[in-house]
Amino acid sequence: MSEVKQATEIVVTEKAQAEIKRIMAENKVPETYGLRVGVKGGGCSGLTYTLGFDAEPNEGDTVIQTDTMKLFVDGKSLFYLSGTELDFSDGLNGKGFVFNNPNAAKTCGCGESFGV
């Protein structure tokens, strides 16, 4: 059974939540779906961030409830993402989601991969 926690492990800013809701509406993703946040091996720094939508959590996932959505995070990813803030930027440096991860010892220039 999944564990439900308050948004203490990963914080999603209001700007990111608004963008996620916009993407869900644009792609007709049901509001009952959750945002899957994770990491996988790859990228120039060793690990890359992943985002996607799932109808339900997988076995062993931690479910984090924010004000407007649920996050699904597997145990391995939560280890690397604990304390991370997920934000959205549409500034001069480009448009996209930004992971402010205190566990990242190094990051690549594009900000999409990190190492610990």
Image: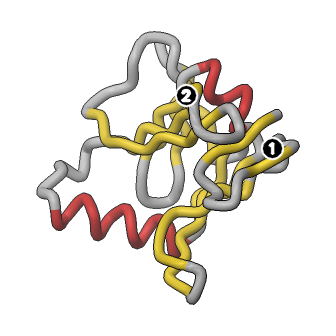
Residue 68 location (% of width, % of height)? 43, 59
Residue under numbered circle 1: 104
Residue 91 in sight: yes
Residue found at the very far left of the displayed protein: 28
Colouring scheme, one of rainbow, by chain, secondary structure, one colour: secondary structure
**Disc 1/disc 2 C-alpha distance (Å):** 14 Å
Place of residue 52 in the rendered image (x, y in percent of width and height, measured from the top left): 36, 42
Residue 23, given in percent of the width and then of the height, sits at: 27, 64
Tell me the element at label 2. strand
Q: Is residue 93 above or below residue 21?
A: below
Q: Which residue is mark 2?
A: 40
Figure check: 58 above or below 97: above
- Amino acid type at circle 1 is Ala
Q: Residue at x 55, y 28 (%)?
A: 40
Assign a secondary structure to mark 1.
loop
Ranked by sequence position, the earlier of labels 1 and 2 is: 2
Residue 29 pos. (x, y %): 18, 51
Answer left or right for 47 relative to 64. Answer: right
Using the rendered view, name the quadrant where residue 9 is placed: top right
Give the residue drawn at x 55%, y 42%. 49
The quarter of the picture where residue 86 lies is: bottom right
